[in-house]
Amino acid sequence: MAQQTITLIGGGLVGALLAQQLAQRGFAVEVFEKRADPRRAGFLGGRSINLALAERGLQALRVAALADDVLQRAVMMRGRMVHDLEGNSALQRYGVDDSEVIWSVSRGALNMQLLDAAEAAGVQFHFGQSLVSADFDAQRIRVADVAGVERDVPFGMLIGADGAGSAVRAAMNAHSPLGERIESLGHGYKELEIPPAAELPAAVLRLSGGHDQFALEPHALHIWPRGGYMCIALPNVEGSFTVTLFLPAQGEAPSFATLPDAAAAAAFFSRQFPGLLSLIPRFSEDFDTHPVGTLATLYLDRWHLDGRALLVGDAAHAIVPFHGQGMNCGFEDTVVLANLLAAAPDDGAEVFAEFQRVRQPNANAIAAMALENYVEMRDSVADPHYLAKRELGALLAARAPQHYMARYRLVTFSHVPYAYALERGRAQDALLEQLLRDTPRVADVDLEAAASLLRSSLPPLPPLRHG
């Protein structure tokens, strides 16, 4: 087995999972993480509190023999529960049945599970150690502890798994420009919380549709779509929901710039999200104290510096969160990279180049689909034409399953490359548009003729691995 030491910067979700997989494959792995150990200091993440775990991420956890443990602390979400302006709600399933669901997981709890697994595999962690600089010619990094005391550490192979604000990326870019482009969405987000049902008055709960310890239906991702903006809510295991408001950062109302304080925001919620405000008893405190997060997409021309340094996960390809695939894409990275390194442990330059060749087109594809999904979530889910295409697509999937699968299902419940899902989705959408152009009502479409057109127009889908 290989014994080369690999130095990882970043002990978050992707860094911890990658470290565990590399250690399992015989590598000596050291991880430097700027935060304190969350298992001792408490989780202090600044990013979203919970995340959507889908098939790609689950498959990576299966490879690491962690999937069952993670799912024991996750909440199943069958689909989108769409809430309209009149206070009505309806579920739009993600998949065909309960074999195709996504899971709401706690970022902090998952990170701690992954750290435990990595340590058990032999990974050595150094917490409270920030990357100050990197000398790629001498192959040494400089790290600093919380007191500011610096020291030099040699490395043979350096991997940056330190997120969208990657210090490794900054050091690599200073050494040799990576062609970095950061495209801001122009929208921000703010997180609020619906507490467990026991903390809310019975009168408030009577109309909310929840059960047991949950104030809302627990097995759904709740969306309040409002065209140019939206609110969402994801369930947490203990019964609470993490609520996220997405709005333009600047400009005319509604934007974060036009909601200067909790009083203005509460009035806005009362008008636009009926029934939601009463479920957030700490609304004023949360709104005034929680920061507005930024949303952007990162593109790089180059992810690596020959065989010396490589970027993975958000450090290489941060995306907006609207397809729930950021973590899943990063987890998929870890399996591909660990397998490549295990196959050629002494050829870092070739491995890193191959990793970028395989993963970059897929990272670009999911970045594009995540941006498109924001429009879908905040607008299209309430649009009659979108709903008609969705209905027709489901009928075609039932009639010609070898030739049609909704793009969302391809991304979320299969292992086909993201780039394939993007292109196939575009081709299928064009076909649906063609079928509904002259007969906008799904009931008027000749389904047998439509299925024949589908089979003659598009090649069969590749074998689809589920689980």
Image (cartoon, rainbow, N blue to C red):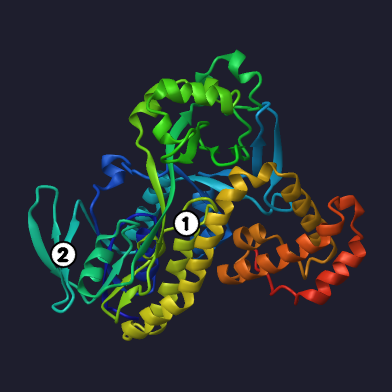
Judge from the rendering whether residue 160 lies leftward or rightward of residue 368; answer left or right: left
Where residue 202 appears, as percent x and y from the top left, is 59, 14
Report the residue that reaches farthest toward the front: 252
SS at mark 2 in the image = strand
| 144 shown above or below 343 | above
Toward which corner of the image does residue 46 lie, by quadrant?
Answer: top left
Whichever of callouts 2 and 1 sits on the residue coming sooner in the sequence is 2
Residue situated in front as seen by the camera: 64 or 49: 49
Q: Which mark is residue 133?
A: 2
Going by the numbered disc 1, the residue's amino acid type is: Gly
| 89 shown above or below 103 | above
Q: Which residue is mark 1?
A: 326
Give me the residue at 30% from left, 64% from top: 122
| 147 shown above or below 255 | below
Judge from the rendering whether residue 299 lies leftward or rightward of residue 443; answer left or right: left
Identify the image quadrant of the N terminus.
bottom left
Q: Is residue 467 visible?
A: no
